[in-house]
Image (cartoon, helix red, strand yellow):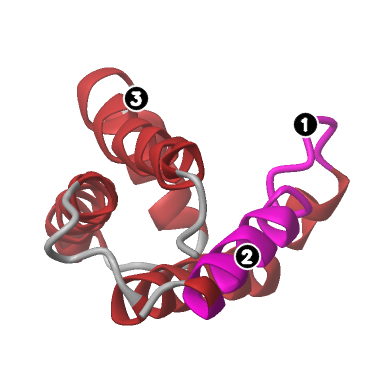
Amino acid sequence: MLPPFYLSLSLAILWLWSGLQPALTAADESLQLLAQIGVPAALQPPLFYAASAWDVILGVCCLTSLVRGRALWWLQAATVAVYTLIVAWRLPEAWLHPFAPLVKNLPILALICYLARRNP
């Protein structure tokens, strides 16, 4: 039995928001974060927009039954893991942030792993 669609929908909303919101309203702050993790200035804009586009692609894929499957879920898990590891390594103070941005990735990873196990 396939998992309920609202699980995919919730991840789609998360990915779409995380791809669109920074690009539309917080580009300067996002570029500052890339500088803080050590990305050279010349690479910051292309990396930022590539990551934003990647998040949007993942969100759209969550809504498209033709591409929803194990490969999609594992790509998402890898993306969350890479984002989390980079931030944890280069901005360890994020662990102490009052909104817990890194800790929230744990239940997100759990949901993605659940979907990977339940989808063909």
Q: For this rendering, which residue is in front, 54 or 6?
A: 6
Q: In the image, which disc is placed on residue 48? A: none
Q: Nearer the viewer, mark 2 or mark 1?
A: 2
Residue 86: tell me if it is visible: no
Q: Is 6 within the magenta?
A: no
Q: Write the start and end of the magenta stretch as one range.
A: 97-117
Q: In the image, which disc is placed on residue 26? A: 3
Q: In the image, which disc is placed on residue 99? A: 1
Q: For this rendering, which residue is in front, 102 or 76?
A: 76
Q: Nearer the viewer, mark 3 or mark 1?
A: 1
Q: Is 98 within the magenta?
A: yes
Of callouts 3 and 1, the N-terminal one: 3
User: Could you tell me residue 54's position as x and y percent?
Assistant: 21, 58
Of callouts 2 and 1, the N-terminal one: 1
Residue bearing the label numbered 2: 109
Q: Determine whether the residue tagged by mark 2 lies in a helix, strand or loop.
A: helix
Q: Residues within 10 Å of mark 1 (few under 14, many from 20)?
A: few
Please say if 84 is above or below 71: above
Amino acid bearing label 1: Phe
